[in-house]
Amino acid sequence: MSRSKPNILVTGTPGVGKTTFCEALAAATSLDHLEVSKIVREKRLYREWDDELDCSIFDEEMVQDALEPLLEPGGCVVDFHSSSFLDESLLDLVVVLRVDTSTLYDRLEKRHYPESKVKQNVEAEIFQSCLDEVREVFEETDIQIWEMPHDTEVVCSSIPRSPANQEQIERNKWRLRWNGSRNSQGPSLD
């Protein structure tokens, strides 16, 4: 597979700030932001609807088929809460955002989620469900997993200016380029 830029999956419990983070990361790196939940809604990539939680139950195969042509050329920041169905050969880095549960609770309440949905998502964060899913799927691969505590205002206003963020990006550029041995140019963040 030939990619000149990496694909980065940003995942985490709904409400941790994935979309805000992805918008800032895409702007800082000139990567395209793919908001998968929006793609699922717009292209109706689901077969069921959960009335109690007021959300779709996405069809993994339909979503994978829709994402594959978008990810093949590279250069995307993929924003989604689920990762187990994604083809590892299309990804170069996985970032799992985490947030304290009181912040998460407040954010989900502001979205007017039903109490059962708020509780379910807060429990998912407590039990680090998204992080465990990522580890299960990608830990045995060459893909790096970054777990990032996320305070939207602090992190997004500092991408990539924060010395810690910049150092981590710089430290891993070689790896992204090395992974590019799948092609002649090699992926880069530039």
Image (cartoon, helix red, strand yellow):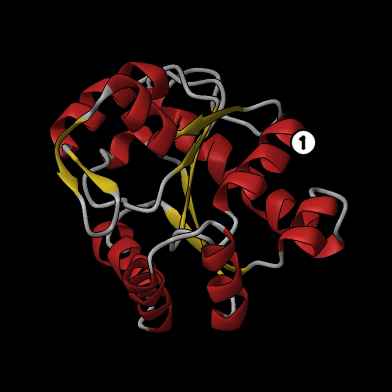
Coordinates of residue 127 in the picture (x, y in percent): 35, 82
The N terminus - image quarter: top left
The C terminus - image quarter: top right
Q: Nearer the viewer, residue 127 or 1?
A: 127
Q: Which residue is mark 1?
A: 28
Coordinates of residue 165 in the picture (x, y in percent): 75, 58
Q: Relative to residue 151, is residue 65 depicted above or below?
A: above
Q: How many marks?
A: 1
Q: Nearer the viewer, residue 69 or 6?
A: 69
At x 32% / y 31%, what residue is drawn? 40
Q: Nearer the viewer, residue 41 or 140?
A: 41
Q: Relative to residue 122, is residue 3 depicted above or below?
A: above
Q: Is residue 117 left or right of residue 20?
A: left
Coordinates of residue 75 in the picture (x, y in percent): 55, 25
At x 34% / y 61%, what residue is drawn? 134
> In which quadrant of the rendered view does residue 102 lie?
bottom right
Q: Is residue 8 left or right of residue 86?
A: right
Q: Is residue 189 left or right of residue 75?
A: right
